[in-house]
Amino acid sequence: MFCNQCEQTALGQACTEVGVCGKDRDMQSLQETLLYGLKGMAAYAHHARRLGMVDEEVDAFVEEGLFATVTNVNFDMESLFELVLECGRKNLRVMEMLDQGHVQRFGAPSPTKVFEGTKSGPGILVTGHDLVDLDVLLRQTEGTGIKVYTHGEMLPAHMYPELRKHAHLAGHFGGAWQKQRLEFSKFTGPVLATTNCVLIPRDSYKDRLFTTRVTAVPGGQRLQGDDFSSVIECAKKCEPLRDMPAGESTIGFHQSVVLGLADKIVEAVKAGKLRHFFLIGGCDGAEPGRNYFSEFARNTPKDTVILTLGCGKYRIRENEYGTIELNGSGPIPRLLDMGQCNNAYGAIQVASALAKAFDCTVNDLPLTIVLSWFEQKAVAVLLSLLALGVKGIRIGPAAPAFVTPNVFEVLQDKFGLKLTGRDPLADLQESLATVS
């Protein structure tokens, strides 16, 4: 962004008029927030379009939002802030379309147990978020003897009946995106990366890493269409996988499943059997401080329920949380895996439905939202929550680098946005004490 006041670029050079340019840095911060939100929304919209779901108003806003970041077009803080929140509103619509597209194509989700690890024989590992690519691959590998495994962000695929009806969708291998280099080296078959969250590969597997469309990495093989024959041939030639079971997990608590239990959940809350809800998820990363989320989740009381989604769930899913009893429906797991960041719309729908059932606002619910922070999609999801007026969200382990102290202060004042503290137990106790 060009600074008109001191005639220097605000990116990369120090401004000479600190007092004046301090305001320009805040404008730059809002413009960057809008840009990152638009980028995250565009990723979700791309997936939705692949499923035949589009919205002209969303497309028009993308143009308007990008235009608002052009040099010397908008220096007004108030209008920029409104555009940032509008990005959140439009992203909510995009996530709704994506959810509808998934359900229409792959069927109504339901909880299911997923085998974790590998089984003997040739296999293909699929990572990323594009379920259409997975669907096409499953059809093309039918009857070949090749097993297909999901990785990382692809885990929610197992909750859709039209995908899991393929017997050779054999299970799930691996954790969050930042462990790819280690995990892909151990997986002896080809890896198909369908979207973002792919890392530049090690030499040990780059010759068997395939990417789709705009996803590309040095050394990998980029596929621009829906023909996966080269991946299949690679799987036939690669060293077969060995039997390496790593247990199983239960996933698939889509909003339709949770909302089907809404009356029982309300009864449990009113009867004092269910005290609090925690939404713990978001993106994941390798930097220090993310053990905060593991400790926070591990210490949640036994009369509480944890909703989780996104790669952040890999920080908390290995702990045993037990179950909680709902009258007439039996026990449900205390940890409910709702999916990936793509499924954030579902968590919002659950919160909205519970607020309606209790005749209160979302901010009055016994609900605490704790989000691990990393990249552009997280910006879009956070903006959707703020646009809905959700307050008291904790994000961490650090503030977004592009948000200036002044802008963060505005977010604190308007929405009670706060950073995760150094002591997760203290934050947990504060959450239980302040949200009734």
Image: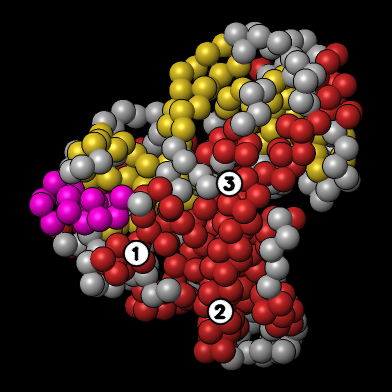
Is residue 157 within the magenta segment?
A: no
Q: Residues within 10 Å of mark 1 (few under 14, many from 20)?
A: some
Q: Point out residue 180 in the picture as x, y percentages from the top left corner.
A: 64, 31
Instruction: Report the residue at 88% width, 37% height from top.
Output: 227
Q: Upstream in the sequence, badge 1 or badge 3? A: 3
Q: CA distance from mark 1 to mark 3?
A: 22 Å
Residue to which mark 2 is pinned: 86
Which range of residues does the magenta coloring cover?
Answer: 261-277
Instruction: Report the residue at 73% width, 24% height from top.
Output: 124
Residue to which mark 1 is pinned: 353
Q: Residues within 10 Å of mark 2 (few under 14, many from 20)?
A: some
Q: Nearer the viewer, residue 80 or 259?
A: 259
Are the residues at dot 3 and dot 2 in contact (C-beta closer than 8 Å)?
no
Q: Point out residue 326 in the picture as x, y percentages from the top left corner.
A: 21, 43
Residue to which mark 3 is pinned: 107
Instruction: Report the residue at 35% width, 52% height from top.
Output: 260
Q: Relative to residue 81, is residue 356 drawn left or right? A: left
Instruction: Identify which amino acid the numbered label 1 is placed on.
Output: Ala
Give the residue furthest to the left.
271
SS at circle 1? helix
Instruction: Identify which amino acid the numbered label 3 is placed on.
Output: Gly
Q: Upstream in the sequence, badge 2 or badge 1? A: 2
In the image, residue 64 above or below residue 100: below
Q: Point out residue 73 in the picture as x, y percentages from the top left corner.
A: 72, 89
Q: Nearer the viewer, residue 21 or 295?
A: 295
